[in-house]
Image (spheres, rainbow, N blue to C red):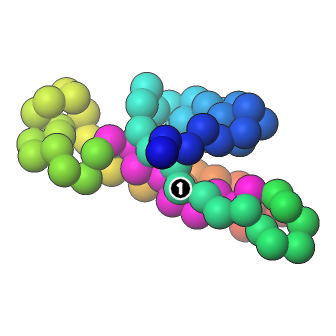
């Protein structure tokens, strides 16, 4: 049976994809047992099963994601 995440989780996933400048992708998460809050741990800007993703999309989602992570890590180091 298909699973439909809670609306709040869907809104957070949409915000994650928007912040990563991704038009589509998958975000993996689990629900933290004690707090009941979602914990997001993996972003896949496109399916891992797509061969030639850069040719298909016209850009490298991996390079864009790495740049995003590096940028935000640098911001955290300044705090």
Q: Does residue 59 appear to the left or right of 74 in the view shown?
A: left
Question: In the displayed structure, would residue 5 be above or below residue 75?
Answer: above
What secondary structure prevails in the magenta region?
strand
Which residue has dot 1 on it? 28
Q: Is residue 7 above or below residue 44?
A: above
Q: Residue at x 24, y 33 (%)?
A: 59
Task: Count how many numbered circles sit on residues in the image.
Answer: 1
Choose between 22 and 39: the one closer to the eye: 39
**Would you say residue 48 is visible in this rendering?**
yes
Query: Over which residues does the magenta segment extend?
Result: 38-46
Q: Residue at x 57, y 52 (%)?
A: 71
Residue 39, horizontal then vertical, whole percent: 70, 61
Classify 72 as above or below 57.
below
Q: Is residue 44 magenta?
A: yes
Residue at image position (17%, 38%) is 54
- Circle 1 — which element? strand
Magenta-drawn stretch contains 64: no
Q: Quadrant of residue 34?
A: bottom right
79 sits to left or right of 16: right
Residue 1 horizontal/vertical position (percent):
48, 45
Q: What is the quadrant of residue 9 in the picture?
A: top right
Comparing 48 with 19, the one in front is 48
């Amino acid at each position: 049976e298909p699973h439909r995440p809670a609306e709040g989780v869907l809104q957070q996933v949409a915000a994650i994809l928007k912040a990563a400048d991704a038009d589509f992708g998958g975000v993996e998460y689990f629900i933290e047992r004690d707090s009941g809050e979602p914990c997001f741990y993996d972003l896949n800007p496109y399916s891992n099963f797509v061969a030639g993703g850069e040719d298909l999309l016209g850009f490298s989602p991996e390079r864009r994601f790495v740049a995003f992570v590096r940028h935000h890590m640098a911001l955290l180091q300044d705090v």
